Image: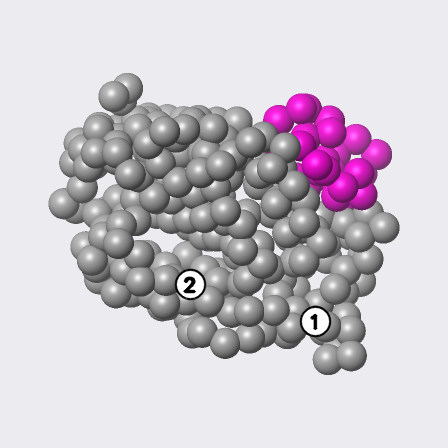
């Protein structure tokens, strides 16, 4: 994997976080979450056949993208979205390095509409958790390890894409990890969710958890806590039958 050695934020002398921090200190990134996602992909293949389609929204350097792509060799495809240009280069490089010919990367942000968005540019030569960067300024923006300017002169313009605008013929798994823009992405995916009923993994740290649950409930999704995320499975998806809960969270029976 191509990893920026500065991709970390230290909380104290021993504790830190960030994709780069985990990979460089543990040689892995959220392995339990990734294994669970692979099991979800297996379920969708079992119930809906080959040709599984997964979207990785907020892909960072592609840890999920690479694992999903390798796992689905010969029967599925991944499209990964990453808004930060420098991080996108690492994502695309990791796809190439791992020979993931069934994955493609797009340098774009996901949102409610199609257009453009001005996003800040951190200094990638200084330590920070770049995956924690919020694209929009807010009253409670997270300190990622360095001060971030949202002044227009310090921002760059990237494409903004709604999932509905992709006009997908199929969608099985949608991961939304977009640092506070999760509700925007769901708003821009309304028709796709109603049509294809994909499994959803939605980060619920910086967006309003109750509002996310309201949106998904309206679309007839069953919602389960999944660490820092919410897992959404449509009431009509047979995958729901293989799901159970334990004291450690949701568990998926082996396909």
Q: Say few, some or many: other residues with alpha carbon within 10 Å of mark 2 (under 14 / 14 to 19 / 20 or more).
A: many
| Picture coordinates of residue 159, whole percent (x, y) | 55, 69
Residue 120, placed above or below residue 26: below
Find numbered disc 1 in the image and state the secondary structure of the residue it sits on: strand
- Most distant residue in the bottom direction: 152
Residue for point 58% across, 30% down: 98
Residue of label 2: 185
Q: Say few, some or many: other residues with alpha carbon within 10 Å of mark 1 (under 14 / 14 to 19 / 20 or more).
A: some
Residue range in magenta is 1-29
| Image quarter (top left, top right, bottom left or bottom right) of the N terminus | top right
| Picture coordinates of residue 231, whole percent (x, y) | 35, 43
- Disc 2 from disc 1: Cα separation: 20 Å
| Picture coordinates of residue 102, whole percent (x, y) | 44, 38
The numbered mark at residue 48 is: none
Residue 1, placed above or below residue 182: above
Q: Is residue 145 left or right of residue 85?
A: right
Residue 146 within the segment the image draws in magenta:
no
> Which badge, 2 or 1, comes first in the chain's sequence?
1
Q: Is residue 108 visible?
A: yes
Residue of label 1: 156
Q: Nearer the viewer, mark 2 or mark 1?
A: 1
Residue for point 36% across, 29% down: 74
Residue 25 within the segment the image draws in magenta:
yes
């Amino acid at each position: 994997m191509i990893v920026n050695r500065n991709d970390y934020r230290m909380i104290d002398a021993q504790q830190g976080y960030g994709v780069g921090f985990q990979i460089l200190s543990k040689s892995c990134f959220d392995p339990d979450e990734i294994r669970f996602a692979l099991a979800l992909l297996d379920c969708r293949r079992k119930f809906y056949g080959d040709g599984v389609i997964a979207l990785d929204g907020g892909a960072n350097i592609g840890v999920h993208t690479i694992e999903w792509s390798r796992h689905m060799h010969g029967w599925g495809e991944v499209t990964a979205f990453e808004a930060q240009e420098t991080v996108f280069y690492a994502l695309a490089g990791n796809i190439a390095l791992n020979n993931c010919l069934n994955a493609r990367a797009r340098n774009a942000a996901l949102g409610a509409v199609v257009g453009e968005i001005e996003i800040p540019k951190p200094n990638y030569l200084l330590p920070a958790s770049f995956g924690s960067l919020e694209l929009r300024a807010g009253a409670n923006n997270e300190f990622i390890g360095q001060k971030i300017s949202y002044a227009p002169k310090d921002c760059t313009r990237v494409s903004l894409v709604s999932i509905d605008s992709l006009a997908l013929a199929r969608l099985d798994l949608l991961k939304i990890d977009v640092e506070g823009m999760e509700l925007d992405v769901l708003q821009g995916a309304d028709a796709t969710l109603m049509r294809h009923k994909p499994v959803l993994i939605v980060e619920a740290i910086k967006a309003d958890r109750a509002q996310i649950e309201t949106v998904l409930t309206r679309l007839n999704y069953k919602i389960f806590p999944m660490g820092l995320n919410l897992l959404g499975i449509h009431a009509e998806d047979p995958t729901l039958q293989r799901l159970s809960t334990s004291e450690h969270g949701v568990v998926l029976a082996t396909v």
